[in-house]
Amino acid sequence: MLYRTVPKTGDRLSILGFGCMRLSPTKTGGVDEERATRQIRYAIDHGVNYLDTAPVYHLGRSEPVLAKALAHGYREKVRIATKLPPWSVHERADMNRILAAQLKTLQTSYIDYYLLHSLSRESWEKLKNIGVREFLDAAKKDGRIKNAGFSFHGNTATLQEIVDAYDWEFCQIQYNYLDEHNQAGTAGLKYAAAHRLAVMVMEPLRGGNLAGPVPDEIRKIWDESSVKRSPAAWGLRWVWNHPEVTVVLSGMNNEVHIDENLKEAGATLPNSLTQDELAIISRVRDTYIQLMKVGCTGCGYCMPCPAGVDIPGCFAIYNTHHLFPRDRTAKSLYIGRLGGILGDKSYAGLCRRCGKCETICPQHLPIPALMKTVSQEMEGRTMGVKVNVAKGALWCLDAAGRIKRKLSQKTP
Ligand code: SF4
Ligand code: SF4
């Protein structure tokens, strides 16, 4: 296992982190706790020392499963990263209450890496106004957390504002060879690293979509390379090739994939890809872009939209929906990320057809017309209902946690 250093603290983290959002599933959709425990301990035994979870993962099961997996001496070998859910925070007291519950659930007296979950400009403003920076300062001072950070799916400009607004130790962004210009992108990665933040990368394989089975056009390009690797290995190596990246999170729930990831994590140094290898990846990227329904490069020149539409974000999820038809998560992602549940409302249906974006787009995309198509396919006529159902599910999760806490307080 190779390790990289957190710039502000000198902490040494394994370049492969265990993402606990996609733990080994049971046939009925729960978590196969025994298998997940075996896999987590195996990864730790082979050098992984960073594990990332959150209260919402697996409908609240991820943190308790991780706690069990880290019993018998494993807790001391690793850094735990977990997250404060902004949608459950309404006042300063909520932050302390949620963190206390997480410490109890995770059976630990401190969280190594504590993130504000999926910050958007709106949720950051809300948290800032109710004192999240003071909360983080206090939690660091009294040792409940060791490092403060945030996870993020917004655009580069918002990332830069948030980076500048607090003395963070780290951040977590989505990054892979298809997202160079999407979300935080390479510009956001470099900005965070230049401000001495460790950068943890999520979705290095776009939720597994870049790992295969890949379209025939893509397979042919990989086959032409004199260096033989799986699509997953190519994708991971591309991310690790960036010296600004500290940890790459992989949601691992298959023993073969864990071994493959561990092997790559033991061999990939920064700037280690050759020009030929980078050229092959560029061809794969270009081919994916050609295969996409909408040829949006994610450059962001069309932003901001006066109606609040996340134009590149809408196209990115729409393209994923069409490129990877077996992936059923794109629509949920669309509702969660653009519907206003995890941030500001920014879905295609908000477009007022003002045409401002169309005159700027270097790809000459008919954006207002495309927004109509995206809205019809991704939202249908029931966007409001879907958003409310998803919000209801989050509320239930939150309420279940509160009830559980009350019951445990009453139990002698
Ligand atoms: S046409 Fe629609 S997407 Fe484009 S800037 Fe106007 S409101 Fe925004
Ligand atoms: S300007 Fe065009 S290519 Fe660039 S992000 Fe907007 S829609 Fe995509």
Image (cartoon, helix red, strand yellow):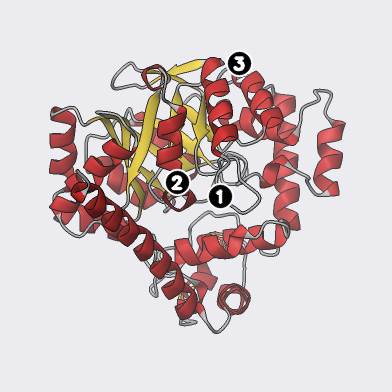
User: Does the residue tagged 3 have its C-beta within 8 Å of any atom of ligand 2?
Assistant: no
Residue highlighted by disc 1:
30
Q: Which residue is drawn at 76% across and 49% down?
A: 287
Find numbered disc 3 in the image and state the secondary structure of the residue it sits on.
Answer: loop
In-front residue for pair 242/26:
26
Q: Which of marks 1 and 3 is in front?
A: 1
Q: What residue type is labelled 3?
A: Gly
Q: What residue type is labelled 1?
A: Gly
Q: Which amino acid does label 2 sit on?
A: Arg
Task: Give neighbour class at mark 2: few <14, some 14-19, many 20+ (Cα, 10 Å).
Answer: many
In-front residue for pair 343/258:
258
Image quadrant of residue 205? top right
Q: Relative to 148, does residue 184 appear above or below in the rendering?
A: below
Q: Where is residue 390 in the image (x, y as percent from the top left)?
A: 45, 68
**Contact (Cβ within 8 Å) of mark 2 with mark 1:** yes
Q: Relative to 103, does residue 337 appear above or below in the rendering?
A: below
Residue highlighted by disc 3:
266
Find numbered disc 2 in the image and state the secondary structure of the residue it sits on.
Answer: loop
Marks 2 and 1, Cα distance to the nearest angstrom?
8 Å
Q: Nearer the viewer, mark 3 or mark 2?
A: 2
Q: If you read the primary sequence from the N terminus, does the residue marked by circle 2 or circle 1 appear first?
A: 1
**Number of the label disc, if any, that sits on residue 61:** 2
Find numbered disc 1 in the image and state the secondary structure of the residue it sits on.
Answer: loop
Q: Can residue 188 be seen in this view?
A: no
